[in-house]
Image: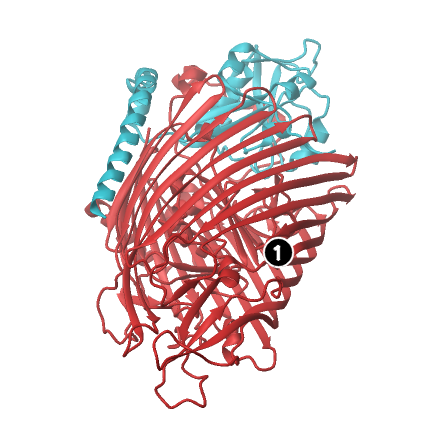
Amino acid sequence: MSMGRSCRYLFLLGPLLASCVPATPAFGQARLLPPVDFDQPLAVAQEKPIPEKKDDLFKLDLERLMQVPVAPATPSAPTLSGQQLVSTVSRQESTVAQSPAAIFVITQDMIRRSGATSIPEVLRMAPGLQVARIDSSRWAITARGFSERFSGKLLVQIDGRVVYNVIFSGVYWDVQDLLLQDIERIEVIRGPGATIWGSNAVNGIINIITKRAQDTQGALVTGGGGTFDRGFAGVRHGGKLGEDLYYRVWGKWFEHGPGSYSSANLSGDGLTHDDWRQGFGGFRLDWEPSTGDTVTLQSDWYRVDAGRSDTRPSPIMPPSFVFNNIEDERSRGGNVLWRWRHEASKDTNWTLQAYWDHFNRDASNRTFDFRIDTVDLDFQHQFPLTCRQKLIYGLGYRLVDVNFQGSQFDGAFAVGDAQRSLNLYTGFVQDEFTLVKDRLLFIAGSKFEHNAFTGFEYQPTGRLLWSPDEQHSIWGAVSRAVRIPNVGEVNLSRLSLLPAFPAALPPGTPVFGQFVPPLAGSLEAEDLIAYELGYRAQPTTAFSWDLALFTNIYRHLITPRPGAALVPGPVPGTFVQPLPRENGVHGEGYGAELAVTYQVAEWWRVYAQYTYLHLFLHRAAGLPESAEFFETVSPHNQVYVQSSFDLGCRTDLDIIGRYVENLPGFTPEVRSYLTMDVRLAWRPRPNLEIAVVGQNLLDSRHLEHGTSQILTNTLVEIPRGVYGMITWRW
Amino acid sequence: MCRNLAAWCGLIMALGLGGVVPSGHAQPLQAQPLQAQPLQAQPPPEEYDFKARFVYQFCNFVDWPKDLKLGGKTFLIGVVGRDPFGKHLERFAGAAVDDKKIVIERFPAAKDVKPCHVLFVAADADLPAVLAKTRNQPVLLVSDRSGWAEKGTMINMYLDEQKRVRFEINHEAAKRAQLNIRANLLKLARLVKDAPEAP
């Protein structure tokens, strides 16, 4: 890695930071376009001297022009520009300006310039998301609160494939990866999107869309390494197999170093057991057999090894009754997805999609091994109902087969059913009604589904979008969404050490709480009614902002209830407190999310995002205070500011500042942190990029998340990291 | 764990090798003639320098209706919205297209658009308004924004992964405007059709 060469550019950093407000003319004037004279009369133009002989380059014919790579002009503020393409809101391509939802789109350019090396890191820039790195490979990512590794009110999809895990409704972020260069865009919606996407899309949806094979032709090689991101490499090749058949194959490997023990850990400072390695590979085929038909076949396979450490209560391990678990989690999995999209006519199209997803996790201590296979079929059809109405409906079926093949360390997890198959039947219908052309749009719809846990559920929404002119739009929405109980809540019993509950027993008697499966049918789905209001404005081409406000009313949140009679534990002298789950908590969430983009000059762009969130939870009588845990584990205030400079000479500089407020609900408290990422990239040729990235630069390490309520993980601080990276395409 | 890694490195290498070989055949051959030119020795040309050349080249591959009495001896190229070309398009002012001399005019917004042969629709322009304004007129609409050819511009430029300028053509839209795009140009383009969109 040519550190020396890139370091030359670092001196630019100082003056730029110092002169952030006054524009630095040295860079600015050279690149500013001449002012456009709109009133230029035709006559003047005609009097211009006619070139004596045409520039040699005029003679270059088109075919040869088409072989020359160019230096792309600065993309001008595309982030919030209302014209950005989105498809998550209504399952059909639309634009941000036309979307009555709190949507944010992360483009490929933003991914590249963020310096992120994994999808979760990329998501930090999205307003309304809480992204906390628990350790090297684990993340707590939520929208609008309930920040926990295992909390599941967020729907995450990659190319239409649902990647949340039915055992705990959350996402194993360590096995969700792609060659980041292949991502077309990531659409992030805060708020319910359950009407078209189904349960679990309660507080948000993250929809990751990769490029078509047509758009990834040629070869790409990328690689690099550094201190925390120790090493990574990726290759991709795209080509053409036939007249209308394109492919790409890709592979990726990386190794992340471990974080540091938090000073709060008893074990003292040092490196934790959480290093993370993975290998990914896959392909995608896109075929257009005839006009209007697109067939996609894609598949990804991976092996991921991630270290972890946690402490588990163990009634079979006296005298401490604590098992210090240090192990490697080995995940193996993959998927195959097939999709056929047919555009029958100008306004009518349908899509048929099927996928199979396989996920297998073994832990070296056999603490919790399982396998999940998912088969999903989905059909959607859109057609005009009248000249002002577009109707879209869909039908889906999903079979999830969960197999706990060998959780041998029963001290922590005891499994109710060793195997369980879940059937999910869904249907949705949504009508988009244009009340006033280009000005007033009304959307109404509902999802209907039948699931294995709570039976029939409906999730309706009503949305209104008013665009008084091209530059402004105001939208409002009322929606209902549910999170159905997961396999973990219904089928697993889990032990945890209870510090507080036992009263009548002599001090020191080990008592374990044990989550027990509820009586069949006694758990209801968690329920949300969300009221949202948004305002988007792009007063000038250089400046735009997007504000979303929301009130969420939650009911029937699931929580364990202590109080049942103690039963003797597996070792004489120990006791177990059964903890049945119930829908015992309700609450409200309030928040505001603001994203602003300002193109200060041709060469300088600023993007900023502020997220405010406040959750209030109320427990039913008799429940412990811990039932309101989530109230205090999501930051009230978050700020993200990215300043992007095009320094000229094909050099980009990005400086990102991030602030996340403290999380008092954790013990010990997670303190607020302010940190900075810097990325400097140089393209000596249009197809070659050399970048140096520094992450978490303002402190040597910091804690981003506390220990889970479900699993007492070791606290890990995220260290400062520097890496270099080369990307070459041809 | 190490053995697994080795296996994966192997796979990636295999993918890489598999990928490198086929692409090696096609591209260097085509790129070679240019390498001899001073163009390649210099830093890459600016995007809009090249896009301006493309716009000029397009004019030579399109036939306007014979009875069109537009501009007399001038060939009018308009730019609606914020002109991204800077000085680059201006260099073609005075150059000839079919014995007519190019004149370039800029229109701040769709409502200001006057009749012209070619109209470049800048990325910030209001495309539906431009389409409405030029409906049924023989105006070659050129743009460089993803998805706009499907929405009705006749030629839409884009950059491929190697940052080379490519273009797509909406032939139906051209036919509607009574413009004949010659086969030589169609051959070089990715052909698209109108996007399915509700009225």
Please tell me which residue lies in front, A647 or A271.
A271
Chain ID for label 1?
A
Q: Is residue A64 left or right of residue A723?
A: right
Q: Position of residue A489 (x, y in %)?
A: 51, 63
Dividing the picture into quarters, in which one does residue A57 lie? top left
Quarter that holds the C terminus of chain A: top left
Q: Is residue B106 visible?
A: yes
Image position of A300 with respect to A58: above or below: below
Q: Residue at x 50, y 20 (%)?
A: A244
Q: Position of residue A612 (x, y in %)?
A: 54, 67
Image position of A579 with respect to B112: above or below: below
Q: Quick one: SS at disc 1?
A: loop
* Chain A drawing hue: red
Q: Residue at x 55, y 67 (%)?
A: A518
For badge 1, the amino acid type reads Pro
Q: Position of residue A102 (x, y in %)?
A: 60, 54
* Chain B drawing hue: cyan
Question: Within 10 angstroms of label 1, few (less than 14), some, or many (20 or more) residues?
Answer: many
Q: Position of residue A662 (x, y in %)?
A: 43, 73
Q: Is residue A393 left or right of residue A36?
A: right
Residue denoted by label 1: A192
Quarter that holds the N terminus of chain A: top left
Please tell me which residue lies in front, A169 or A408.
A408
Q: Is residue A430 left or right of residue A329?
A: right
Q: Residue at x 21, y 44 (%)?
A: A5
Q: Is residue A23 visible?
A: no
